[in-house]
Amino acid sequence: LRVFSGTANPALAQEVACYLGLDLGSMKIKRFADGEIYVQVGESIRGCDVFLIQPTTPPVNDNMMELLIMIDACKRASARSITAVLPYFGYARADRKTQGREAIAAKLSANIITEAGADRVLAMDLHSGQCVGYFDIPVDHVYGDSVILDYLSSKRISSGDLVVVSPDVGGVARARAFAKKLNDAPLAIVDKRRSAHNVSEVMNLIGDVRGKVAVLVDDMIDTAGTITNAAKVLHLEGAREVYACCTHAVFSPPAVERLSSGVFQEVIVANTIPVPPSHQFPELTVLSVA
Ligand code: R5P
């Protein structure tokens, strides 16, 4: 078994290797002056089961291409099996056509990862269940919520005070599963409508949050429009405190400004995407899913 890291999240890969009691394998990855990517496996992997840890984080296209070239290098080096480990799968939100003549980039991404030579995928908190079916190879789909739930439980919030909130209708199944693991906490739903990509407008709250500690659950925070607008509604509806629990910290601008504007007691994310110091703020907690 050999574990290699791409350049997208080497810190997480290093933690995974430590957890397994292994050294990360040697792999040379370089960018040419024109942006092209060079990959060379630095050791023999003939007959080995190879795991490539490369979340397709922003810059998504670059990290995706790097993953494909890593897979190709391992295939040509006669690995026995290649598992693409995708703690974050970019393009996962492009998982369906919502208007005519749109692409389904999640399916296309799955196709090219398979075509490059991956035998298996290990992914965390895919945006939607159908993404699993987009790969014509086995997918192990794991969830970051156990780490987040352990952390939340350590806060000893009385279960009678808690309400789990989905920030949009699409996330209800995820929030319901989370609530179930919190002693069947009650659920509320924010009815979010989008007027344009990356612009979220909150319309309605379904459920009761008055006097409660509201825990917003989502797969990712991108520009933070969704989660911040939802938090504002929860405060207007009388929530005592609002926590955000989201696996993937995409944090595109102006996410940091929104998240640190005082609406959240705490913002809890996983380290599937590296959070640089410039994106950290006092209310942020980053948990390891290594
Ligand atoms: C949408 O369905 C996702 O689950 C997230 O709620 C969304 O992508 C977050 O994006 P933003 O932070 O830009 O509102």
Image (cartoon, rainbow, N blue to C red):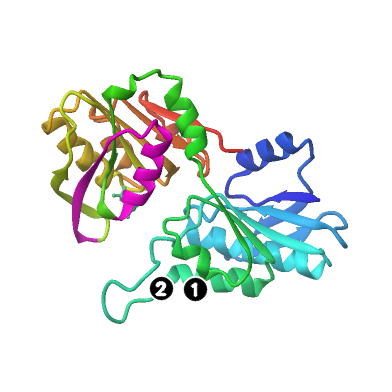
The C terminus sits in image quarter:
top right
Residue 74 lies, with reference to residue 42, above or below; the image says below
Look at the numbered disc 1 and say if its residue's Cβ is closer than 8 Å to ligand 1: no
* Dot label at residue 61: none
Real-space Cα separation, disc 1 to disc 2, in angstroms: 7 Å
Give the residue pinned by disc 1: 108
State the image quarter where residue 65 is shown: bottom right
Residue 89 or residue 186, whichever sits in front: 186
Magenta span includes 25: no
Residue 107 % position (x, y): 48, 71
Instruction: Determine the residue positioned at 68% across, 38% down.
Output: 14
State the image quarter where residue 99 is shown: bottom left
Question: Which amino acid type corresponds to the residue marked 1 in the rendered image?
Answer: Leu
Label 1 crowding class (10 Å Cα cut-off): few <14, some 14-19, many 20+? some
Instruction: Determine the residue positioned at 18% across, 34% down.
Output: 234
Question: Which amino acid type corresponds to the residue marked 2 in the rendered image?
Answer: Ile
Residue 93 seen from this side: yes
Instruction: Determine the residue positioned at 41% across, 73% down.
Output: 104
Q: Are marks 1 and 2 in contact (CB under 8 Å)?
A: yes
* Dot label at residue 104: 2
What range is drawn magenta here? 170-196
- Farthest residue, direction front: 184
Residue 212 or residue 266, whichever sits in front: 212
Residue 21 or residue 183, whichever sits in front: 183
Residue 20 lies, with reference to residue 35, above or below; the image says above
User: Which type of secondary structure does the marked residue at label 2 adopt?
Assistant: loop
User: Which type of secondary structure does the marked residue at label 1 adopt?
Assistant: helix
